[in-house]
Image (cartoon, rainbow, N blue to C red):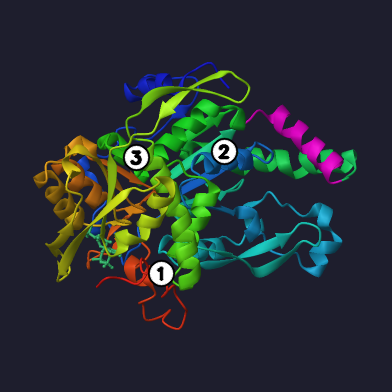
Amino acid sequence: MGSYSTSEVLNAAAVGVHHPALRLHELDLKGSMSAEELPTTSGLENGHQAPFVIGVAGGASSGKSTVCKMIIDQLCDQRVVVVTQESFYYGLSDEELVHVHDYNFDHPDAFDTDLLLSCMEKLKHGKAVDIPSYDFKTHKSISCARKVNPSDVIILEGILLFHDSRVRDLMNMKIFVDTDADVRLTRRIRRDTIEKGRDIIAVLDQYSKFVKTAFEDFILPTKKYADIIIPRGADNSVAIDLIVQHIRTKLGQNDLCKIHPNLYVIQTTYQIRGMHTIIRDAATTTHDFIFYADRLIRLVVEHGLGHLPFREKQVITPTGSVYTGVDFSKSLCGISVIRSGESMENALRACCKGIKIGKILIHREGDDGKQLIYHNLPKDIAKRHVLLLDPILGTGNSAVQAISLLLEKRVQEANIIFLNLISAPQGVHVVSKRFPRVKIVTSEIELGLNDDFRVIPGMGEFGDRYFGTDDYQSSTPFFADDKNRVGLL
Ligand SMILES: O=P(O)(O)OC[C@H]1O[C@H](OP(=O)(O)OP(=O)(O)O)[C@H](O)[C@@H]1O
Ligand SMILES: O=c1cc[nH]c(=O)[nH]1
């Protein structure tokens, strides 16, 4: 870790001052989103938003893959895929194999760049692709070896990625990992002799014959195309933090919490991403959908409860010691928005013994209009903190109807915590603008809404999938014996 803080470097960059932690060429640091620039339907094509493509180039053993890994780890709440240029090595012919030591693997002609371009074109248009794999032992290419799905962020990594202008043109951000030649050579010797068991003379021979000259002739000249040059590669964590901040800004998701301080997105983990992957998959059975939605709901409910006020409380432990803790808030209730919100009642009951739960029914008229048609709320609701339950925040119309009713019943705006599984930025914007003191707790922020006002990527019609009333899963049994799970409509 260098001795510079991220904000120090950002400030330096923002006012155009050179900072030694990174060299900025064209990085647009003024790109943070205002509320008006939040993703809208028009920014999305058939529900697909073009991925952010990052190119990471630099000499062999410069630490490119470690830089990529650090970026991926920090972007763990985004869908990120890495595509390596090495996957696009041409396989060697029998004749080339005989003279493999004379083959220049560091030359631009060693790569099937046309195939790389066609794969990237598909990924950029939101289509899954089959990527080849190159076997470093046999020097053969295996076509269609790995399926890569479209993602929010695509990282392209390789020594010669900036050599071909068509490949460069694919990239939203170009990073050059600039590591000293002696460090690269030392790493190469260590990797090839210790990890690959190769003879040191052969390694040095290849280095001086091909690797060094290719770096000077083809790789180094492409450094000028980089937007960001990272000195010291993966050791430069300040530069990597900055890059991640910039990507987040461009994706426009993290900023939502800055624009709306009432929005709380639960800290993601790979477990949470895994659960989301299952419930978002159209092929998931009703049984699995319920199981994983329930797990996620429980996490959101627990997180939401953490926003309730508390009083300090001391207890005596079995060892006779004093434990200073807190006492749960007692005056609360849940209000579920029929019917999808009812799926969240069990989790709330499991966390808050004996909690009162009221209901609100909002009727959807057409695709956008909503009308409140029924409610049954605790009589003393005005004195309570209210956990409003509805797994989907889309346009925000239903939430606005529900919250308006609660305010009519004299619930304090600051006493409302709206719990949901997924929130579209549009809904967050609408609810927060109208009710800035209502807290919104969610597990993921979505890309936006489609032309039918459905959340995308979303999970389809939540109520139908949870209560088993959707067409494509109608043969799957659901919990007809559980009155909470048979919708009330
Ligand atoms: O933010 P909005 O655009 O208003 O969308 C969100 C609403 O849509 C869903 O209910 P839906 O109307 O699908 O009814 P259901 O729960 O009965 O299936 C969801 O449970 C919300 O209530
Ligand atoms: O995408 C959406 C929008 C509203 N309600 C849902 O269940 N899904």
Report ligand 2 position as a quadrant.
bottom left
Please name which of the two marks, 3 or 1, marks the residue nearer to the observer: 1
Amino acid type assigned to the residue bearing label 2 in the image: Met
Q: On residue 264, which mark appears?
A: 3
Q: Which residue is mark 1?
A: 482
Vertical relation: 367 (above or below) 85: below
Q: Which residues are magenta?
A: 179-196
Q: Residue at x 54, y 44 (%)?
A: 72
Beta carbon at label 2 within 8 Å of ligand 2: no
Residue at (32, 36) in percent of width and height: 330
- Report if the CB atoms under discs 2 and 1 are less than 8 Å apart: no
State the image coordinates of residue 339 (x, y, percent, origin top left): 28, 65
Q: Main secondary structure of the magenta part?
A: helix
C-alpha distance separating marks 2 and 1: 46 Å
Residue 64 visible in this rendered orientation of the protein? yes
Q: Nearer the viewer, mark 2 or mark 1?
A: 1
